[in-house]
Image: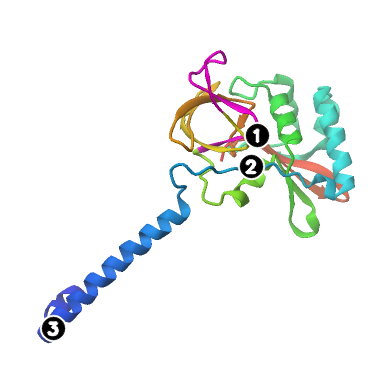
Amino acid sequence: MTELRELNRPMKSLKSSSIARFLRLLAVSLAALLSLAVTPVHGDTIKILPVDEAAQDPEFLDFRDRLLTAVRKRDLDVVVAVATEDIKLSFGGGYGRAQFREQLLAGDNGAGGSYWEELEWALKLGGVFSGEHRRHFCTPYVSCAGSHQCSYCDPYEILVAINDRAPVYAAADATAPVLARLSFDVVTLVDYGSQWQQVRLADGQTGFVAFPEFRSPIGYRAAFEKREENWQMRLFIAGD
């Protein structure tokens, strides 16, 4: 109805039409500028650099070091004891210390990988504190600090090189030619596989990468909380 009333204003129709065209052009221009602001330009290199704040709290650092040692030794009782009674283990309702024990005993993370290895990687890649009085710690940094370094990155559509010589292969084969070695770079996920993932590099090339050199922000991550002066693991989960 508003448009109809505007068309029925003969004395201002030409002026109104010109203003409307100008506003539409301005809106399109602003949308284009905003798009450039949040979308990586072809050829740009984006990096998510490692960060580990654990040393800022010596008590937590000692706790994490001891937990990592227990994980590497596959010390089931010590690792399970660190979990809260209500530890969250999946987005489908999986939780609790008893189920955590079962998953560690099974070893399989459900995707053909090792549950223990996923926990070890999550712990040793470093993370960040959050919350009031810094009573929460999230690890690994790829999942917990990546959004601060690349706020427009879609965690579902990227992988991150977690070292400074991460290889990208021409084919899904470790004997294939190496197209590039990336240093903490973000790459775009083209096709996900159980072992190999096809990715697109900043220069437009496509290649193949594999765990553990590349990691997804929605891969396994852990969250710790200081409850009654004791650090405990309240979450160990993958996906979103």
77 or 201: which is nearer to us? 201
For disc 3, the marked residue is: 9
First in sequence: mark 1 or mark 2? Answer: 2
208 or 74: which is nearer to us? 208
Residue 38 position, x and y percent, is: 47, 53
Q: Secondary structure at mark 3?
A: loop
Q: Name which residue lies at 60% across and 24% down.
A: 110
Between the residue at mark 1 and the residue at mark 3, the CA separation in whole angstroms equals 64 Å
Q: Is residue 199 left or right of residue 232?
A: left
Q: Secondary structure at mark 2?
A: helix
Q: Name which residue lies at 22% across and 70% down.
A: 21
Q: Is residue 32 left or right of residue 12?
A: right
Q: Mark 1 or mark 3, which is nearer to you?
A: 1
For disc 2, the marked residue is: 143
Given the image, on which type of amino acid does mark 2 rest? Ser
Q: Is residue 130 above or below residue 142?
A: below
Between the residue at mark 1 and the residue at mark 2, the CA separation in whole angstroms equals 12 Å
Q: Name which residue lies at 81% across and 22% down.
A: 74
For disc 1, the marked residue is: 162
Q: Is residue 52 above or below residue 103?
A: below
Q: Secondary structure at mark 1?
A: loop
Q: How many marks?
A: 3
Q: Is residue 226 above or below residue 70?
A: below
First in sequence: mark 3 or mark 2? Answer: 3
Circle 1 crowding by C-alpha within 10 Å: few under 14, some 14–19, many from 20: many
Q: Is residue 54 above or below residue 209?
A: below
Residue 196 magenta-highlighted? no
Q: What is the magenta range?
A: 158-180
Q: Are marks 3 and 2 in contact (CB under 8 Å)?
A: no
Q: Is residue 115 left or right of residue 57?
A: left
